[in-house]
Image (tube, helix red, strand yellow):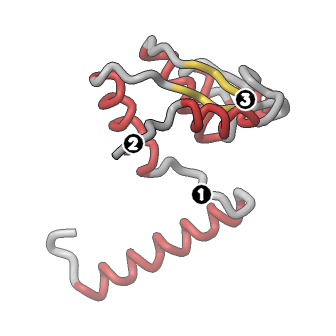
Amino acid sequence: MQGQSDQQWHEDKEAAKTAAKMKCEENCGRAPWGCRCFHDWKANVEQAVALGQALHVFYFEGMVGCGKLSWQELSNETSVKEARKNSGLGASQTAEVAYLESCGYQFQELDVAEFDDFMTSHTAIETI
């Protein structure tokens, strides 16, 4: 911060690191805040949509469509806990799918068991 001594900055930084470590420990080793990954993922989605590319969501095996929440429900702790009980998505992916739906983006939902076949059928083969 401007006008802050180096010593004060160091002390504030250490206090913030300690507080973050405690929050992480309280949350079973997971950071309880968002991350830059969502920002980067969102930028990639926007670029893919602009290029007319198809969007695909892969769910845990046998769980296609399970655990989805609306964008508004993500702030409801009870809804999130209930969705986590039978979800085909990780926590971050739940938010990503909610974002896609809130934007009205079309996407194909697939089982992760289909991933290898999907990649094989969507990989361009170069010939020389």
Which residue is disc 1 drawn over?
31
Residue extending farthest left? 3
**What's the CA distance linking mark 3 and mark 1?**
27 Å
On residue 126, which mark appears? 2
Camera-side mark, 3 or 2: 2
Disc 3 packing (10 Å; few <14; some 14–19; many ≥20):
some
> Which amino acid, by three-letter code, is at mark 1?
Ala
> Which amino acid, by three-letter code, is at mark 2?
Glu
How many numbered discs?
3
Contact? badges 1 and 2 (CB < 8 Å) = no
In the rendered view, tell whether residue 78 sits above or below residue 44: above
At x 38%, y 75%, the residue is 12
For label 3, the SS is: strand
Give the quadrant of residue 116: top right
Residue 91 shown left or right of residue 62 in the figure: left
On residue 63, which mark appears? none
For label 2, the SS is: loop
On residue 111, which mark appears? 3
At x 60%, y 52%, the residue is 32
Camera-side mark, 3 or 1: 3
At x 31%, y 82%, the residue is 8
Q: Position of residue 124 (x, y in %)?
A: 44, 36
Residue 104 shown left or right of residue 91 in the figure: left
